[in-house]
Image (spheres, grey):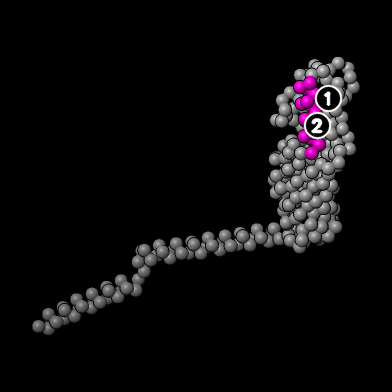
């Protein structure tokens, strides 16, 4: 009887200890869950730290405009009317952290124009004086100013065949104009003085014609060619110059 009672007590004690151990020790799934949560926390901290570092790097622009008075950039405008893929440069002066002044030069030349076939080569040049207002922001700016335009068309053999040979400047049609420009963009200046700018959209509009060479239209014997030349020059005189996504990379000094 005593042995039976003792055996029952030991059996009950063993079961109780096993149950207690099961309830107090973490299961494998609990350990995996804890590791996942730990990884999530570390990833969140890493992302937060990266964002803070990026914000800190991008927050130097206004301070850098206070520190350095001059800058230069190389520019590329992939989408630009009348001719795309313009390259150029900018030289600038920082008046205040809220306002800068700059001279910009852009140029593009194409041998096979997309407007009218067989015209030969077109060259589009722009010389601009631009003011940028930052309105107390780090990078956003409104740009505006004046632009001088030089647009040249060197005629191809197809059109020159309709005029007498050896006439000076007959192969060149040219329109020079004076107008204005306006646009919006962002410009970041990092602590190492490097500049990255992006003019999202700008509008440049010729207003006054200062030079007009249409000797070819006067001398050609082909009425169709005469009309084509006249139409091209009219287009050059008034068509708005829209520029998208003009990239600027440079340095402050």
Query: Residue 142 appears in which quarter of the rendering?
Result: bottom right
Residue 10: mark? none
Query: To which residue does mark 1 refer?
Result: 217
Q: Position of residue 166 (x, y in %)?
A: 88, 17
- Viewer-proximal residue, 40 or 175? 175
Up the image or down, 12 lies above or below 137; here it is below
Quadrant in which the N terminus appears = bottom left
Task: Judge whether residue 22 can be spotted in this image.
Answer: yes
Secondary structure found at label 2: helix
Q: Spatial distance from mark 1 to mark 2, Cα to Cα?
A: 10 Å
Rate crowding at label 1 as few (under 14), some (14 to 19) or many (20 or more) other CA atoms within 10 Å. many
Image position of 41 (left or right of 229): left
Residue 115 falls within the magenta-colored stretch: no
Magenta part of the chain: 223-238
Residue identified by numbered label 2: 233
User: Where residue 243 sits: x, y (%)?
Assistant: 73, 43
**Picture residue at 78% right of the left edge, 25% below the top:** 227
Asked if residue 248 can be seen in this view, the reply is no
Q: Is residue 236 magenta?
A: yes
Mark 1 near mark 2, Cβ–Cβ under 8 Å? Answer: yes
Which of the 4 image quarters holds residue 24?
A: bottom left
């Amino acid at each position: 009887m005593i042995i039976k009672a003792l055996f029952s007590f030991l059996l009950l004690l063993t079961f109780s200890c096993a149950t207690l151990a099961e309830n107090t020790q973490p299961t494998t799934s609990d350990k995996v869950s804890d590791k996942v949560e730990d990884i999530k926390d570390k990833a969140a901290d890493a992302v937060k730290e990266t964002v803070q570092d990026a914000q800190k790097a991008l927050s130097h622009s206004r301070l850098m405009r206070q520190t350095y008075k001059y800058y230069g950039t190389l520019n590329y405008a992939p989408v630009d009317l009348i001719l795309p893929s313009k390259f150029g440069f900018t030289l600038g002066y920082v008046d205040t952290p809220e306002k800068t002044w700059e001279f910009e030069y852009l140029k593009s030349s194409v041998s096979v124009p997309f407007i009218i076939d067989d015209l030969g080569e077109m060259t589009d040049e722009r010389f601009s004086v631009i003011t940028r207002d930052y309105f107390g922001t780090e990078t956003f700016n409104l740009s505006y100013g004046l632009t001088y335009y030089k647009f040249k068309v060197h005629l191809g053999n197809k059109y020159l065949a309709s005029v007498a040979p050896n006439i000076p400047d007959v192969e060149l049609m040219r329109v020079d104009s004076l107008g204005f420009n306006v646009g919006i963009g962002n410009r970041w200046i990092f602590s190492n003085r490097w500049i990255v700018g992006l003019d999202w959209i700008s509008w440049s509009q010729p207003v006054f014609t200062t030079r007009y060479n249409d000797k070819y239209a006067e001398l050609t014997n082909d009425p169709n060619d005469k009309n084509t030349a006249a139409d091209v020059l009219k287009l050059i005189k008034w068509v708005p110059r829209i520029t998208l996504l003009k990239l600027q990379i440079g340095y402050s000094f």
